[in-house]
Amino acid sequence: MFTSEIILQTMISGLLMGCIYALVAVGLCLIWGLMEIVNFAHGEMLMLGMFTAFWMFTLYHIDPMISLPLCLVLLFLIGVATYFIVIKKILKAPFLAQILATFGLGIFLRYLAQFMWTPDYRMIKNPALAGRLGFGGIFVGVPELTASIITILSFVLLYWFINKTEVGTALLATSEDREGASLMGVNTDKMFALGWGIGAACLGVAGALMSNFYYIFPEVGFPFALIAYVAVALGGFGSIPGSFIAGIIIGLVEFLGGLLIAPAFKYTFVFIIYLLVVFIRPQGLWGRY
Amino acid sequence: MNANKKKWIWPAIGAILLLIYPLVITLPFPRHLMIMIFLYATLGLAWNMIGGYAGQISLGHAVYFGTGAYTSTLLLMKLGVSPWAGMLAGGILSIGLAFIIGYPCFKLAGHYFAIATIAIGEIAQHWMLNWDWAGAAVGLTLPILPESLINLEFHTTKVPYYYIAFGIFALSIMVTYWIDRSKLGYYFKAIKGDLLAARSLGIDVARYKFYALALSAFFTSICGSFYAQYILFIDPDSVFPLMLSIIVCLVATLGGVGTVWGPVIGAFILIPISEFTRIQFGGGGKGTDLIIYGFLIMVISIYQPFGVIGITKRFRKKESE
Amino acid sequence: MALLEVQQLSKRFGGLVANDRIDLQVNEGEIVGLIGPNGAGKTTLFNCIAGFYPPSEGTVRFKGENITGFPANEICLLGIARTFQIVRIFKDMTVLENVMVGAFNRTNLAARAKTKALEVLDFCGLAPKKSMLAGGLTIADKKRLEFAKALATEPTLLMLDEAMAGLNPAETVEAIELVRKVRESGITLLLVEHVMEVVMPISNRVVVLDYGKKIAEDVPEKVINNEEVIKAYLGEKYHASRRAH
């Protein structure tokens, strides 16, 4: 039935995909921890990252790995723009407005994409990264492997930035105590914009990486966003490393669950994790709830 | 006493107009339009109970609609149960679902609940697409039964559907009105206003959030059952989709959350527009209207979270100043 | 039997000890003042009693019943009401509606809640403003509303958390009067206060906290002259300079 080889293979695939989930989750966690606003358009921004890579490749024959920096920058700008155009206006708004504003944005982006680019599934054929590597019976796709390595590097870079640089510390301070930080001279407005920029930039990177091996279509972002919410809850509100690790765990559970029980219910397991976390340990594994 | 009576003049006039509407207007499309307005107004009012009054944002309300539609339909198809009983059963099942979704999340901040609702909405649709016994992606076509009130099916004219829909609509208005003035409503608004303060005044927050969601789920479910009997065909894409959750949310927000008449106004504005744009831009599932809905939700949240009623209140304040 | 009995209550937040083995008693009909410098742990003690978080150690007894760790809403039902230092009113509801929320603690009928609320508004002097939106009130009125909400729950013990902060002298006099009226109506009071001119005149007893510990408990006149208390508030130097005289 399920040989240990198949299980191992599934686990590895799950871990690799989990790295992508992890990066997506980190972006969400940053924004959420910074200003307690959940970006309900997170999945759609990821989708934009993927489409950027796709169109760069299809129209200008630029490989996703080369357009990765472009995706990063573009999504960074989109994040900052979102902050100034939408978020800034709802910082003091009623809770309903805060949730619906990004939710509306997500819907808007998703169906705009569908209108402009049709709901068809696209794929990048023959990207630079292709093929599989075999390690004693276990096969790993080159794009997936590269993606995980780059996401881990990105995370390390981000972690260093936040904890070891001055700007990063200002960001941390703002997320822990907005007023205190501003009394210390931190420009909270700029910090928020930066947070949104970086959070979205993570999606640019993840999107470019995924375009190497994943289907690209307007609704693609949604499941990833959902997993990101669960990852942030599991990892612990406000903990960026927590979200990262949680993302990987979820990748593992999703793939194993899909294998051992039924593929159609992959997301159900993820959701059950969510319910368990929320019920048993609301502060997540590492959170500062 | 006089002021109280005055408040009822406009709704009474409205009710009379709506009651004679199908007798005056005999073309099927305008009747269908009004039935849709009643349906969405009720859905909006139902969403309003948990979202507008209690302040818990549900972004996957379609799950209750679908539960109602499928429960009554399956009971009818497999066991021959009358749709009315099926409607009730669907409602009760939806309350159970509300408990499962809400209970873990109600003790926490609002974001967690919103996320849970999105997840459930998607998962439910996914499940139904794969559940062969319940029709899977193909859906269920309701059996054509002799036209009667008990069977809740009418084939020659839309008029009985119209009055049933009106009845459901009127009932939901009355229930909302009752909530608004009762302990439930006050507690809901307190929970929305300030959770800690609510607790310190003796409110069992989780319990009342559940009451709000249960009421909301029940009415949404009833609408689902009605819809199944009206269209005589249901599938996961028509009764569980995100689009439905979005429209319901928009109807309530556009009109004015936390009020009795807000969702009604929202439905009367939005549904005719959406039906007409569907005719203009064609169906095709391209989701063009969703672009507008998404944009509208954004704009309302940013500029006028209190909806149309919020705007009229501002005018009245300016007049009295 | 004391109305409220706190025994050996400690509360830790991670490594920080906010309350350290505090004993406190409030007898029926008393007004007890709880004072201490900033950070002494007064609000933490409040929150432990009122059920906002459970104490790490110790017990809280109310009317003889152990209520340690009970959730806030149950404690309100049992008869302890509290106000918040930073007022938590429902700003999108009217003044009357705000107080009705409190009144619903003892009834399920809107009519009865309304009657009770109007009574309380009258008692607190807010009746003329009953139809105003709570968000539009002045600070002093917001504090009065905060007070009225709690009063409407018909408590046996009312706990006020720095209810006098930010009031001008005229408003403070009115507030003290209100507190006296409440005591006369049979409600026991536990006040956390920073403003000495308020606490001393009205309290039967005063309890002093410093760095999480109880350092004094006595009638107001004696507490004022208590060495430890003076040291806590004004520091070692002042204390030393006083002794030198």
Image (cartoon, coloured by chain):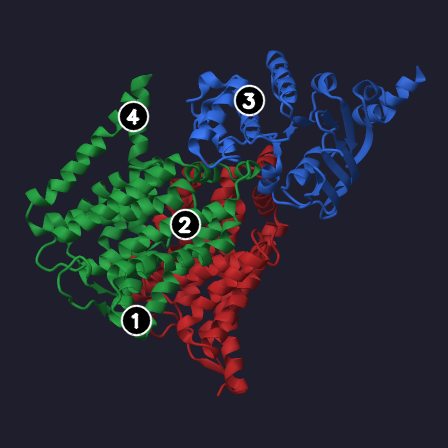
Chain colours: A red, B green, C blue
Q: Quadrant of the C terminus of chain B?
A: top left
* Distance between the alpha carbons at the discs numbered 2 and 3: 33 Å
Verify CB contact (< 8 Å) between mark 2 and mark 4: no
Residue appearing at x 23%, y 60% in the figure: B228
Q: Quadrant of residue A56?
A: bottom left
- Tally the marks: 4
Tell which subunit mark 2 falls on. B
Q: Are marks 2 and 4 on the same chain?
A: yes
Determine crowd level at label 4: few under 14, some 14-19, many 20+ residues with C-alpha closer than 10 A: few
Choose the circle earlier in sequence order: 2 or 4. Answer: 4
The N terminus of chain B - image quarter: top left
Q: Residues within 10 Å of mark 3 (few under 14, many from 20)?
A: many
In the displayed orientation, state which residue is furthest to the top.
Answer: C170
Q: Which residue is mark 3?
A: C144
Position of residue B74 in the picture relative to residue A229 (left or right): left
**Is disc 3 placed on a helix, strand or loop?**
helix
Labels 2, 4: front one: 4
Q: Is disc 2 in the same subunit as disc 3? A: no
Q: Are marks 3 and 1 in contact (CB under 8 Å)?
A: no
The chain holding disc 3 is C
A229 or C215, nearer to the observer: C215
Left or right, B135 with respect to C59, comes to: left
In the rendered image, which residue does mark 1 sit on? B134
Element under disc 4? helix
Residue beneath disc 4: B4
Q: What residue type is disc 2 on?
A: Leu
Label 3 sits on what residue type?
Answer: Arg
Mark-to-mark CA distance, 1 and 2: 26 Å
